[in-house]
């Protein structure tokens, strides 16, 4: 990508990380960080102000919650 930069996020989020795009712009994020075999932490829930009040934050949160449910015996912490 011209003018872009690459960051290895695996150092920060050893679980899952999602990006929400509007065209080619990142407008929201959410992540799960695995604490241990039974616990995950919700991280990096962010949504640009212009995209709030549209249900997109809930969609990001539900995505993370559903992924945590797929992982056997994973309790989700904030």
Image (spheres, rainbow, N blue to C red):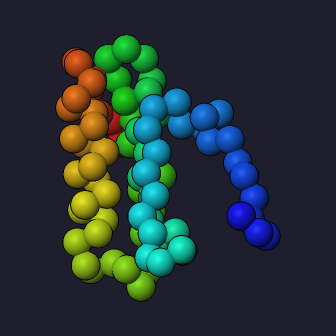
Placement of the N terminus among the 4 image quadrants: bottom right
Vertical side of 42 occupied by 2: above or below: below
Answer left or right for 76 relative to 49: left
Residue visible at 79% across and 70% down in the picture: 3
Residue visible at 45% across and 24% down in the picture: 35
Say which of 72 and 39 sits in front: 72
Q: Position of residue 29 (x, y in %)?
A: 45, 58
Q: Position of residue 5 (x, y in %)?
A: 75, 58
For residue 50, which quarter of the picture?
bottom left
For residue 51, which quarter of the picture?
bottom left
> Of all residues shown, which one is farthest toward the bottom?
50
> Of all residues shown, which one is farthest toward the front?
1
Q: Position of residue 22 (x, y in %)?
A: 44, 76
Asked whether residue 48 is in view, the answer is: no
Asked whether residue 22 is in view, the answer is: yes
Residue visible at 46% across and 58% down in the picture: 19
Say which of 43 and 11 sits in front: 11
Placement of the C terminus among the 4 image quadrants: top left
């Amino acid at each position: 990508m011209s003018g872009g930069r690459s960051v290895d996020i695996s150092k920060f989020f050893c679980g899952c990380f999602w990006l929400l795009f509007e065209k080619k712009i990142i407008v929201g994020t959410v992540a799960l960080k695995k604490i241990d075999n039974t616990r995950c932490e919700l991280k990096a829930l962010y949504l640009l102000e212009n995209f709030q009040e549209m249900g997109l934050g809930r969609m990001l949160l539900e995505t993370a919650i559903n992924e945590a449910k797929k992982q056997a015996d994973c309790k989700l912490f904030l």
